[in-house]
Image: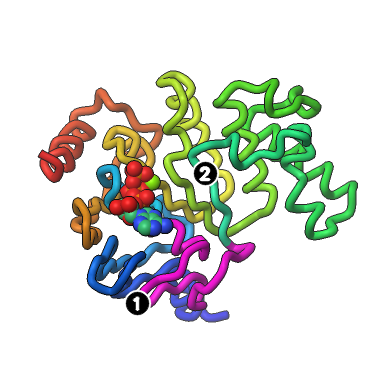
Amino acid sequence: MSSITEKAIANVPAISITGLSKSFLNNHHYVLEDVNLSIGKGEFFILLGPSGCGKSTLLSMIAGFIQKTSGELIVDNEEVSKPGRNRGVVFQQADAALFPWLTVRENVEFGLKMKKTPKSIRHETSAYFIELVGLKGHEQKFPKELSGGMKQRVQLARVLANDPDILLMDEPFGALDAMTRRTMQTELVRIWKETNKTIIFVTHDIQEALLLGERIGVMSIGPSSKIETIYSIPLPYPRQFTNKEFNTYYQKIQNHFD
Ligand SMILES: Nc1ncnc2c1ncn2[C@@H]1O[C@H](COP(=O)(O)OP(=O)(O)OP(=O)(O)O)[C@@H](O)[C@H]1O
Ligand SMILES: [Mg+2]
């Protein structure tokens, strides 16, 4: 393959959104209107906005759970019409996502079992991801025996075990205490660097956005929300919120919501 072709392939966006709009009730009341966004392969992108602006709606459309009203929404060169294996979703409430009657290992292996992956490969894969999220030694536990942070790690390991190219994360650490949340944020950056996934991460927390994202898309207040401004954050990882530049970005973004 020539280097020009390689470069062209590398530049194909993972997700391309043009003039995307969503109305739930009728075509006069738009939750989202004219959203435009292009996300590169392997990018860590944050969708930031106040409660009710349409972050989950946008993420659910990319996941293929809900249908757009108009516009173009392309993932891996295909118009999205339904969920697909190339997209893994991590929900805010791990309780709703995990099967309470399955152990940690069985939860992580669930998708692989559905795909009829042979048992030995299933075990090998789940062992790898359970270790990656720091849950080694807890394989035989049931969700009710785990803390909120541990359950969130199980959910993450399960999604990663299915090996989607794209991780769609909807305020996944929103329900965690501040300390566990910091640990999970650090772990996620580490996992992203190890796996080269494309990540779209939803949050309404500016500090979390700045700790994680290579780019941050700030959404306007609804109705008819759109992505108002996109900030590139060229700060190295791991990021420190005591850093001066970090605070300059914080103020800039905060100004959107004052
Ligand atoms: N199924 C639905 N039917 C009708 N309206 C809906 C539906 N889902 C969401 N909405 C409306 O769309 C708007 C955006 O909701 P959404 O859940 O996407 O916001 P959000 O930015 O994720 O908020 P939060 O930060 O609180 O999670 C809200 O006004 C909400 O009432
Ligand atoms: Mg939401």
Q: At 36% across and 70% down in the image, what residue appears?
A: 17
Looking at the image, what colour scheme do you see?
rainbow
Res 168 seen here: yes
- Hey, which quadrant is residue 212 in on the image? top left
Q: At 24% across and 61% down in the image, what residue appears?
A: 226
Q: Which residues are magenta?
A: 57-86
Q: Nearer the viewer, residue 232 or 60?
A: 60
Considering the numbered disc 1 on the image, is that residue within a helix, a strand or a loop? strand
Marks 2 and 1 sit apart, C-alpha to C-alpha, by 25 Å
Residue type, mark 2 in image: Phe
Left or right placement of residue 79 versus residue 205 in this view: right
Percent of width and height locating residue 223: 21, 58
Q: At 45% across and 29% down in the image, what residue appears?
A: 175
What residue would you read off at disc 1? 70
Considering the numbered disc 2 on the image, is that residue within a helix, a strand or a loop? loop
What residue would you read off at disc 2? 91
Percent of width and height locating residue 64: 51, 65
Q: Nearer the viewer, residue 29 or 200?
A: 29
Q: Is residue 151 above or below residue 11?
A: above
